[in-house]
Image (spheres, rainbow, N blue to C red):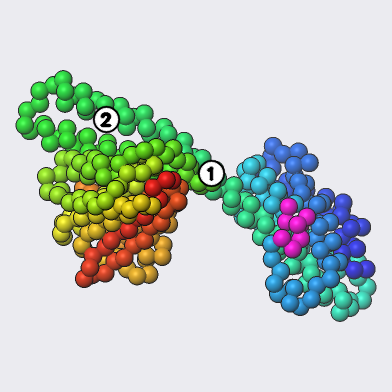
Amino acid sequence: MGLSEFIVLNVDRIVDEWEQFAETITPAAETMNSVALRDHAREILLAASRDMNTAQTASEQQAKGPETSPALDEAAASHGELRHTVGFDLVQMTSEFRHLRACVIRLWVASIDAPALSHMQDMIRFNEAIDQALAESTAAYAEQVNRSRDIFLAILGHDLRAPLQAVSMSSEMLERKTRLDPVAQPYLLAIKNGARHMGAMVNDLLEFVRSRLGTSLPIEPRAMDLGQACQAALDEACAGQPDCAPTLQVEGDVQGHWDPRRLGQLLQNLIGNALQHGARRGKVTLHLSGDSEAVTLRVHNVGMPIAEDAIGTLFDPLVRSPSEDLSQPGTSTSLGLGLFIIKEVVDAHGGRIDVTSTEAEGTTFTVVLPKNA
């Protein structure tokens, strides 16, 4: 008897053994009933059997991957999601497939009187199907893990806003209502700057999570002057830093329709990045130019160049430059999210961003934004 036929005829017996094994996976299995323990085992087995009966050339076998067996993929993915929901860890979930594979082959081999060459081919096809199901379950499980992590980070970022706001408002009221001696003033300034930087980190974290849980960064464009926004961002970035002296050059018409809050994030992160890597080594320059269609912003600083092999991942989340000095006052975030947020804002406005970095010329970030986002 071929293996695919054996699976169909003995599917209930095999699933019974699956359930018996799943019962041993504690503590998650302690609160699960028979239906939950058996989950998609029957569907996975029957889909694997159908897959084994499908004609397959050598080239198709080599190229086999996701979406070649939709029913098998769907059942396996659902199994991975549900196992995550009930509290199985990844090792426990994958052990179910190991047991399933061993159970089927053990029972089938015991039923064979005389092994034949076709039986070897059946076993190969069965292993392919189980490996594909395992891959789909693992991918679905990992996606659920990522989503749970993102939701946790979103809750954490949201909950941090209240105490940060309390620190910020208290420091403002203390400055307005109390006459502090000169010795205490620097401490108050440090509290205000620390709260501001922590607020920027929380905002970046929330934008990162929002982009992962959603599709794209939402924007609300309205008429604004990018030159004024740049100057305001410079003033804020340099507040409390007497040595901070970046220059702003504006040419042409730099008015357009963009989201002021998102552009503020972009500017703060770009300027913070330039100050962090360039303030101690030379000047930071912002050059803004506009024509009838778009506005181009160039932010330049000198200092250690970005490694060529790092430029490709520069805008990836949670990636920081090896040369990053977090003690520098211009740092807007220590999470490695600043440049990621910049790219998200640029993409949401239909623009583009490029970076060049050499030891001789310094580092320049170039942002081009259409005037009507």
Q: Is residue 289 left or right of residue 35?
A: left
Report the magenta residues as a range: 67-74
* Residue for point 36% across, 55% down: 368
Judge the density around disc 1: few (<14), some (14-19), many (≥20) Cα neighbours within 10 Å. Answer: few
Give percent across and percent down for residue 132: 71, 62
Q: Which residue is mark 2?
A: 168
Q: Say which amino acid is labelled 2.
A: Ser
The mark that comes first in sequence, 1 or 2, is 2
**Callout 2 secondary element:** helix
Image quadrant assignment for residue 364: bottom left
Give percent across and percent down for residue 363: 26, 63
Q: Distance from label 1 to label 2 (Cα)?
A: 30 Å
Is 356 placed above or below 85 here?
A: below
Q: Residue furthest front?
A: 292
* Residue for point 37% across, 65% down: 311
Q: Say which amino acid is labelled 1.
A: Gly
Magenta-highlighted stretch: main secondary structure? helix
Image quadrant assignment for residue 124: bottom right
Give percent across and percent down for residue 171: 22, 28
> What is the count of numbered marks?
2
Seen from the viewer's position, the closer of residues 204 and 195 is 204
Q: Which residue is mark 1?
A: 214
Is 214 placed above or below 352 here?
A: above
* Residue for point 12% across, 48% down: 243
